[in-house]
Image (tube, grey):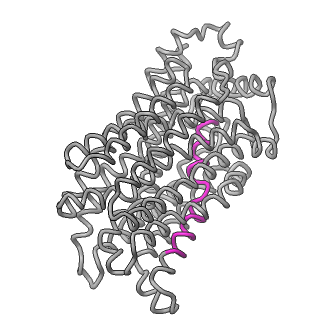
């Protein structure tokens, strides 16, 4: 239908680029620790396992505060809650630059200050990503979600494609104003989060019914379409918050996401060190590190659109995760830098291609507060891999002297995710357009044509 294409094009243009920018900043603040480590580990006397523990402990705090944070977002609205999240994480991300000063003032070791700030950063940022995913379910019909989440999550690889060379260049500011290069990385990359927190308050809209920037017929169509979809899901089964938390499908999706995140974060935190081992400068390391993420940007967009066009989810997740595991496993056995980076770039296609499709799975059968809770549960449980992946990589590196065995461990986690998704029950019919809309002419052909316009 013409109104479908017009409405969704307007919503996409309004929300997706801005949310991508916010997540770009969030993810950069989360993983720039990998670049800071090129200088920071020596300055703070951190071993690989100590660094891996500190990098990953962020996700332990994230785990405990995800669900409460998302329930607060559902209650108070995305606009205010996301602004609060961005403001507090911006302050704490910038505080990472002052670890030596905090250590001298408090008497704590630099390692313990590093751990503490990473925990506080995890608490501050908890709820941001699942909150955005929940927000997108309030604005986009089911059959558009994989591509829209793919557009939004393209900020993950983009944060490395753009951020890695920037971080590498910032390391070159070593000694400026008496600060080390790694301190400049933390300080300058935290500033955008603080600025954007104020922009969020004035720009975001919580729900379609409040969207004065939509025309009246567009707003009414979108509200009705989303209400019809919600009614269709709840006619099959309506879940309470408690039921969503312990639902076997939610837990299975969390296991899938755990496998995907293990490959993602285990690689993200240590890839700069792997590439630096090729004998490159910090700036060269930044550019080479970005290669798997360039591939990831492409796969997130194209794989998500392909999943939507076929309205198929399980095999799109399984195939992508299999590619991720295969690429990482192959890289473990390769010493040639060019071949290793080719293998890791292939892995990048799978790592990032599966992520947006995974998020269509809980939204297909949950709604309302149960959806907010279920999405947060999947994210919090799955993000525990953000602790175990880096910590395992660091421990194995200290034990073996190389990254090969650690990469094989990450590949194994990806294969666990493949097995979990193949065993998952998923009813694609719940994602199809509600019957009243089909009778009004929203055929599969029309949906595809409309979908290609957003």
Horizontally, residue 48 falls left or right of residue 419, namely: left
Percent across and percent down for residue 371 are 70, 40
Q: Quarter of the image containing the C terminus?
A: top left
In the picture, measured across the screen, residue 150 lies left or right of residue 45, that is: right
Identity of the residue drawn at 71% across and 12% down = 436
Q: In this view, does 387 lie above or below 159?
A: below
Residue at 30 percent of width and 81 percent of height: 179
**Magenta stretch: includes residue 116:** yes
The N terminus lies in which quarter of the figure?
top right
| Residue lying at the far front of the rendered structure | 400
277 relative position to 92: left or right: left
Q: State the residue at coordinates (62%, 32%).
A: 361
Is 37 magenta? The answer is: no
| Residue 157 rendering spot, x and y as whole percentages | 38, 46
Given residues 290 and 324, the one toward you in this image is 324
Magenta segment: 115-138
């Amino acid at each position: 239908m013409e109104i479908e294409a017009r409405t969704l094009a307007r919503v996409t243009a309004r929300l997706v680029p801005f949310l991508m920018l916010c997540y770009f900043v969030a993810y950069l603040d989360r993983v720039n620790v990998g670049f800071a480590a090129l200088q920071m580990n020596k300055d703070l006397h951190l071993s690989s396992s100590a660094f891996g523990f500190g990098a990953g402990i962020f996700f332990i705090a994230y785990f405990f505060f995800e669900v409460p944070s998302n329930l607060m977002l559902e209650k108070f609205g995305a606009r205010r809650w996301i602004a609060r999240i961005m403001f507090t994480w911006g302050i704490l991300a910038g505080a990472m630059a002052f670890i030596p000063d905090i250590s001298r003032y408090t008497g704590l070791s630099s390692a313990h200050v590093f751990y503490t700030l990473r925990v506080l950063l995890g608490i501050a940022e908890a709820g941001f990503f699942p909150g955005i995913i929940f927000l997108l379910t309030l604005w986009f019909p089911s059959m558009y979600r994989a591509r829209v989440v793919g557009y939004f999550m393209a900020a993950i690889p983009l944060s490395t494609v753009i951020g890695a060379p920037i971080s590498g260049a910032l390391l070159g500011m070593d000694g400026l104003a008496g600060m080390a290069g790694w301190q400049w990385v933390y300080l300058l990359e935290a500033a955008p989060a603080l600025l954007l927190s104020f922009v969020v308050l004035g720009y975001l809209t919580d729900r379609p019914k409040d969207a004065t920037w939509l025309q009246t017929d567009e707003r009414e169509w979108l509200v009705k379409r989303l209400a019809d979809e919600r009614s269709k899901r709840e006619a099959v089964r309506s879940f309470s918050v408690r039921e969503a938390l312990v639902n076997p499908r939610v837990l299975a999706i969390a296991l899938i996401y755990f496998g995907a995140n293990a490959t993602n974060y285990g690689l993200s935190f240590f890839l700069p060190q792997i590439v630096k081992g090729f004998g490159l400068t910090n700036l060269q390391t930044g550019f080479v590190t970005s290669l798997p993420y360039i591939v990831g940007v492409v796969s997130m967009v194209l794989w998500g659109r392909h999943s939507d066009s076929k309205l198929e989810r399980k095999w799109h997740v399984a195939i992508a995760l299999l590619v991720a595991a295969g690429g990482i496993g192959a890289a473990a056995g390769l010493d040639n830098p060019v071949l290793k980076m080719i293998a890791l770039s292939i892995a990048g296609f799978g790592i990032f291609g599966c992520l947006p499709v995974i998020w269509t799975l809980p939204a297909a059968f949950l709604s309302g507060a149960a959806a907010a809770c279920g999405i947060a549960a999947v994210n919090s449980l799955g993000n525990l891999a953000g602790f175990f992946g880096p910590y395992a990589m660091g421990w194995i590196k200290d034990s073996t002297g190389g990254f090969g065995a650690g990469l094989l461990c990450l590949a194994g986690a990806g294969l666990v995710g493949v097995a979990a998704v193949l065993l998952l029950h998923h009813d694609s019919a719940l994602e199809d357009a509600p019957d009243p809309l089909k009778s009004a002419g929203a055929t599969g052909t029309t949906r595809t044509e409309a979908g290609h316009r957003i």
